[in-house]
Image: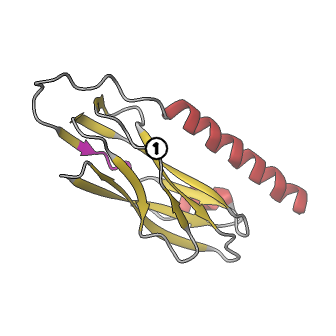
Amino acid sequence: MTGRRNLARSVIGVAAGLALAVTIGPPTAAVAAGASPATWRLIDLHQRFCTPTDLGRIIYFPVFIDGTWSQELRVRLADTPPGFEPTPGPNVPPGHSDGPGSVGAASAWMPPIPVKSEFVLTVRVTSGSRTQEVSVYLGIDDDWLNCINNGPRG
């Protein structure tokens, strides 16, 4: 059984890494001087992440923005359970995006969790003058396929 668990963890890790490598890229060029005021929107994709029990790891939730922003955006993972350590992600420089590509990620170190669990966390993005949030869902379950198919939903 341990071999299956290790294989599942390896597959999950590789899949998560590939997904982030494909979706996370730099935002488009900065807004020109004199451009119209910032009008951006944090897109809620009802994200869900599942991981096995007893696996301490860093978790990531990609951030999707639609619009234009003239101030640096700070991205954070909030409302994490006790023991989680949100990691300050790289801030997103002024720019614009039409939404389909991730402009950053919210992340946290997650301690090993020994029991099947579900959590609702918050991705928070702020420009200093404007803050937006979306809920994201984290499932802890050794039956990864069950977690993905039947786990927490937004």
* Left or right of residue 58: residue 40: left
Secondary structure that dominates the magenta span:
loop
Q: Is residue 123 above or below residue 64?
A: below
Secondary structure state at the residue bearing disc 1: loop
Residue in view at x 46 percent, y 44 percent: 90
Which image quarter holds the N terminus? Answer: bottom right
* Left or right of residue 36: residue 58: right
Residue in view at x 10 percent, y 29 percent: 36
In the rendered structure, does residue 110 fall within the stretch colored magenta? no
Residue 47 in percent (x, y) is at: 45, 52
Residue 112 in percent (x, y) is at: 69, 70
Name the quadrant containing residue 78: bottom left
Q: Is residue 7 above or below residue 115?
A: above
Residue 17 vs residue 91, the one in the foreground: 91
Residue 129 in percent (x, y) is at: 18, 52
* Left or right of residue 77: residue 31: left
Residue in view at x 57 percent, y 65 percent: 139
State the extent of the magenta-drawn residues as a range: 41-45
Which image quarter holds the C terminus? Answer: bottom left
Residue 30 in percent (x, y) is at: 28, 25
In the rendered structure, does residue 43 fall within the stretch colored magenta? yes
Residue in view at x 70 percent, y 47 percent: 13
Q: Is residue 36 above or below residue 85?
A: above
Q: Is residue 82 above or below residue 120?
A: below
Residue 109 vs residue 47, the one in the foreground: 109
Pointer 1: what residue? 90
